[in-house]
Amino acid sequence: MPGPKALDPSSSPRALIGAELRHAREAKGLSQSELGEPLFVSGSFIGQLEAGTRRLHLEYAVQIDEILDTNGFFERNCRALAKSKYPDHFAEAAEAEAAATAIRHYLPLLIPGLLQTPAYAAALFRTYRPTAPDTVIEELVATRMERAGLLADPTTPLLWVVLDEAALRRPVGGAGVMAGALRHVLGMARKHRIIVQVLPFSAGTHAAMGGALKIMEFADAPPLCFVEALDTGKLLDDPAAVARNSLTFSLLQAAALPPEDSLTFIESVAQNYEHGDQHP
């Protein structure tokens, strides 16, 4: 039976902490399950920490230092890495997203953040924060565009998005902004960088009527699912919960238009916005 996959601690600070955690755990002669037991977490959760796909929270870091006799190493590093550019409810999901090899995403009302244009993101943030200074909006947009930069890699992660027709029809920022946003999605799909399907209104009821979901897969760790609502979100690693959400996404894929038909649909909506710009 092959041993655990070698870790690359140079890839990110979180990966470095994960590599150190594996080293310290093995030096103590503990399995992942044995370390997880006093923390009331699963062995797979410890594996995700070691692989760098999960963030080490302070409460666990303190206990791990005590269990592994690491003289405060994990607590110190956890505090140093605690600051994030993202809201608390999304920070860990954003970190996991950056490490994922595949992402499947459905949002009922919006184009997903990884596919947003600066103008579309700015219109959203200005709506969310109507009295914020322009500098704050600019910083938020820059952070979102930086996050979207993970698609600069030509192959990884695989991004499969199901766009609800509502996300296409709601004119975020006006017709011009929407036309540009949809053209960006079309461009990414036509370059074969992403896979996009449209879930049309004609599909009627569907498996994700309850809200958004994002499923992330990793090369050396079990998949995770992120579910979110207004100013809240939760990262799920329970295999049964991830399996349920994976089935939900599969049902969405089955109900949505095929990829080629979806691009035709998006093209038509984009042209409508462009026509509206020319003839208000």
Image (cartoon, rainbow, N blue to C red):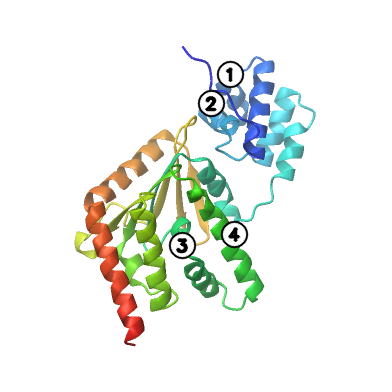
Sequence-wise first label, 4 or 1: 1
Q: Which residue is at the far top?
A: 1
Q: Which residue is mark 1?
A: 31
Where is residue 243? Give x, y as percent: 36, 37
CA distance separating discs 4 and 2: 33 Å
Sequence-wise first label, 1 or 2: 1
Q: Is residue 45 left or right of residue 60?
A: left
Q: Which residue is mark 2?
A: 43
233 relative to 72, above or below: below
Amino acid type, callout 2: Gly
Q: Which residue is mark 4?
A: 143
Q: Is residue 157 left or right of residue 164?
A: right
**Element on which disc 1 rests:** loop
Amino acid type, callout 3: Gln
Sequence-wise first label, 4 or 2: 2
Instruction: Kindly identify which numbered label has been placed on residue 204.
Output: none
Question: Tag 2: Cα neighbours inside 10 Å, few (<14), some, or many (≥20)?
Answer: some
**Viewport quadrant of the C terminus:** bottom left
Which marked residue is nearer to the observer: mark 4 or mark 2? 4
67 relative to 148, above or below: above
